[in-house]
Each structure stands twice: as C-alpha cells, then as structure tokens.
Image (cartoon, rainbow, N blue to C red):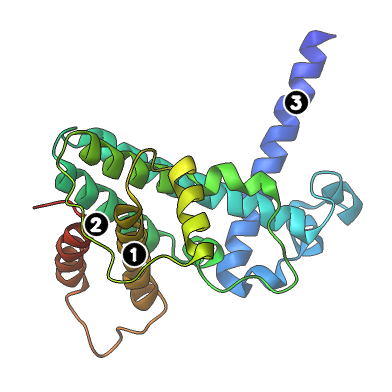
Amino acid sequence: MASARALRERVRKELTDEIVELARAQLADRGAENLSLRAIARELGMVSSAVYRYFPSRDDLVTALVIDGYDSIGEAVEQADAAAVEDDHPARWAAAGRALRAWAVAHPHEYALVYGSPVRGYHAPEATLQAAMRDKMVLGRIISSAHQAGALSIRTLRLPLTEGLAEDVRRVRQAVLPDVPDSAIVAALTAWSGLFGMLNLELFGHFNNIIEDRVALFDQALVQLADLAGLST
C-alpha cells in the first residue's frame, strides 16, 4: 500500500512539474494573462478536466509560476551571497546584485511575472509571501551584518518620517533588518529599489538605443547603490 501511494505521489509530482513547464513556455509566448489550462491539456494529450485536478484555475497555475520564480531568484541570490567573503559587505552586495541581474536576463518572462506589471485579475495569495521574501532576506542579512560589525555608515534623514512611514519602517525592521536605525532602513530600501529600477529599465526595453554596455552600467550602479545603502567600498 505504501509503495502504491509513493508511486502515485511520484507520478503526480512528475505531471505537476510537466504542467508548470508547459505553462512557463506559454508565459513566454502569450503572457500570464493568457495562460490556458485547456491548451496545456491538449499538449499533454489529456482531457482538460484531468489537468484541473492539479490546478483548479488559471490563478492556481499563475501562483505556482510566481512561487517558482521567487524561489529561483532567491536561490540564486542566496548562493551568490554565501560564496562571498562574510565580512566584505560591499562584495556581498555586489555579488547578490550581479546574481539578481544574471537571473533576470536569463529568465526575462519569469522576471516580468514577479516584478513587472500585475497580472490583470490575479491577486497573489499569502502562499507566495515566503518565496517572495528570500532575496529581501539576503539584503537584510548584508545590511544587518554590516551594522553589527560597525561597518555601516548611518546618515541623518533629510526629512522626518511621517507617522505612516515610521510604521512601515518598523515592520521592515521586524521582518528583515533587526536593530538597524530608521535612516539606514530607508537608505537600504532605496538602494534595493534602485537595483530593481535598473533591471526594469533594461529588461523592459527602456535602455534600447541608449545604453549598449549594460553590464558596465549595472556595475557602476551597484557601487553607487552600495554607497547609498551605507556600505563603504
């Protein structure tokens, strides 16, 4: 009985993985809004009702792709950070940033799904949150480690925090930047947003006919953003 159950589970996982892989190909061809479970069923030679047993709706399939994308990004950034020298915080920042860009360039459609325009009619469930936090946790570890080592430059805020932003900063501190001062959290958030801003401009075509050496520009931006984050280079 146990062997039969294990076999069924293995077959289910293999078919689930195949459905997700076909959905990933559809994502590149037609975008997330036009994912079709019926088309996937046809490719698998199955009736559509059989596929719906694995993914009851398009949104369930989008959620699987979102989690898979976030996990893949997170793993790439985590590995890059782990390979860097632990007490060289600027090098860790640069390694994480380069890993992020490399993943995005290699997976533009998956990047667009998780960091591009929201999919019309889709609302990401809480099940995506843990995966979505993986790359942010790397940022938190780098900044927090620098602060604990006395290697984080703390600047004074030019503007006072509003009541709402102060609450936002408190949540960020609790989630990913324990014991880090308010101004350093604002700086870290701004620098991290700058990384994704650079990637969005590149991946969504806004550098076309303007910037040719995008690797060099990104490396320059990494240094500037590290300084903004308080990581002296």
Q: Please state if 149 lies on the left or on the right of 11 as rendered.
A: left
Dot 2 or dot 1: first in sequence order is: 1
Choose mark 3 or mark 2, whichever is in front.
2
Q: Position of residue 158 (x, y in %)?
A: 27, 70
Q: What numbered label is drawn on residue 60?
A: none
Label 2 to label 1: alpha-carbon separation:
8 Å
Q: Secondary structure at mark 2?
A: helix
Q: Secondary structure at mark 1?
A: helix
Q: What numbered label is drawn on residue 190?
A: 1
Label 3 to label 2: alpha-carbon separation:
46 Å
- Residue at the spot x=23%, y=40% of the render? 147
- Residue at the spot x=65%, y=68% of the render? 32
Front-most of residues 152 and 91: 152
Residue 181 drawn above or below residue 212:
above
Label 2 close to label 1 by CB (< 8 Å): yes
Alpha-carbon neighbours of circle 3 within 10 Å: few (<14), some, or many (≥20)? Answer: few
Q: Position of residue 104 (x, y in %)?
A: 39, 61
Residue 190 drawn above or below residue 142:
below
Q: Please state if 222 lies on the left or on the right of 49 as rendered.
A: left
Alpha-carbon neighbours of circle 1 within 10 Å: few (<14), some, or many (≥20)? Answer: some
Front-most of residues 202 and 181: 181
Choose mark 1 or mark 3, whichever is in front.
1
- Res. 18 in view: no
Q: Please state if 109 lies on the left or on the right of 200 as rendered.
A: right
Q: Which residue is mark 3?
A: 9
Dot 3 or dot 2: first in sequence order is: 3
Q: Which residue is mark 2?
A: 229
Q: Position of residue 101 (x, y in %)?
A: 31, 60
Q: Amino acid at mark 2?
A: Ala
Label 1 to label 3: alpha-carbon separation:
44 Å
Q: Amino acid at mark 1?
A: Thr
Alpha-carbon neighbours of circle 2 within 10 Å: few (<14), some, or many (≥20)? Answer: many
